[in-house]
Image (cartoon, rainbow, N blue to C red):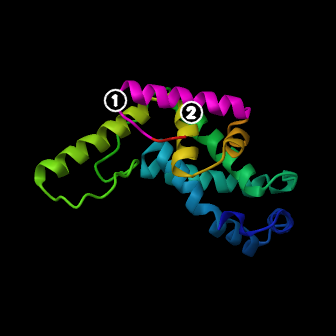
Amino acid sequence: MLDAMSVEDDAQLMQAVAAGDRRAMEALYAQHVDYVFRIAYRFLLDEDEACDLTQSVFVSLIQSARRYRPEAKLTTWIYRVVVNRCLNQCARAGRRLRSPSSEAELAEMPASEESRPDRIAAREQQRARVRAAILELPERQRMALVLRRFEQKSYAEIADALGCSVSSVESLLFRARRSLANKMLPLDIA
């Protein structure tokens, strides 16, 4: 689990990584790869791009392990790297992200006991509308939404990851909520 290690354990792990300890590198990767990939995938909605970004994040973490200072949790530092990489990738690409395939389930809808084809089709249309509306959000709003809604991060954790204030996070989420509501897509992101 993310918070299972103490700040002291994180500092020791990063010192070992900085010293070139292969087992420490593997431990760092094993402890954090799932949520790094999850954030990248939910933001980029492309499995290949998320895999590439995840690998580049870990290369960067290992290369910069000597600079890690345990003033904050290691997970906060990692989130910051992931967020910056995602935002930079979008800026470099200079494009909006493509719509996900039908297998990509960004916003899971509650399972219905009804299995009528018309209900199934309606749910799939709603999922597609949610994915499309989220993809249309500006990058910082989308990242705040992903971290809050899908990663259950606190406003303070999101602020650390985005490098802004808690009030800025509140504003980003408010604007994202308003934008989604304007598209007739009620989504609980508070």
Q: Which residues are magenta?
A: 164-187
Q: Residues within 10 Å of mark 1 (few under 14, many from 20)?
A: few
Label 1 residue SS: loop
First along the sequence among labels 2 and 1 = 2
Label 2 residue SS: helix
74 relative position to 106: left or right: right
Measure the C-alpha gap from mark 2 to mark 1. Answer: 16 Å
Is any part of residue 40 visible from this angle?
Answer: yes
Residue found 42% across the figure and 34% down from its top: 135
Residue under circle 2? 173
Residue 64 vertical placement versus 146 (above, below): below
Residue 115 pos. (x, y %): 16, 59
Return the residue nearer the eye: 79 or 175: 175
71 relative position to 34: left or right: right
Residue 73's image quarter? Answer: bottom right
Residue found 50% across the figure and 30% down from its top: 176
Q: Quadrant of the C terminus?
A: top right
Residue under circle 1? 184
Query: Tags 2 and 1 in contact by the CB under 8 Å rule?
Result: no
- The overriding secondary structure of the stretch rendered in magenta is helix
Residue 156 pos. (x, y %): 72, 43
Return the residue nearer the eye: 164 or 13: 164
Residue 110 pos. (x, y %): 34, 55
Residue found 72% across the figure and 56% down from its top: 75
Return the residue nearer the eye: 135 or 127: 127
Is any part of residue 52 visible from this angle?
Answer: no
Residue 111 pos. (x, y %): 30, 58
Residue type, label 1: Met
Residue 24 inside the magenta-drawn segment: no
Residue 166's image quarter? Answer: top right
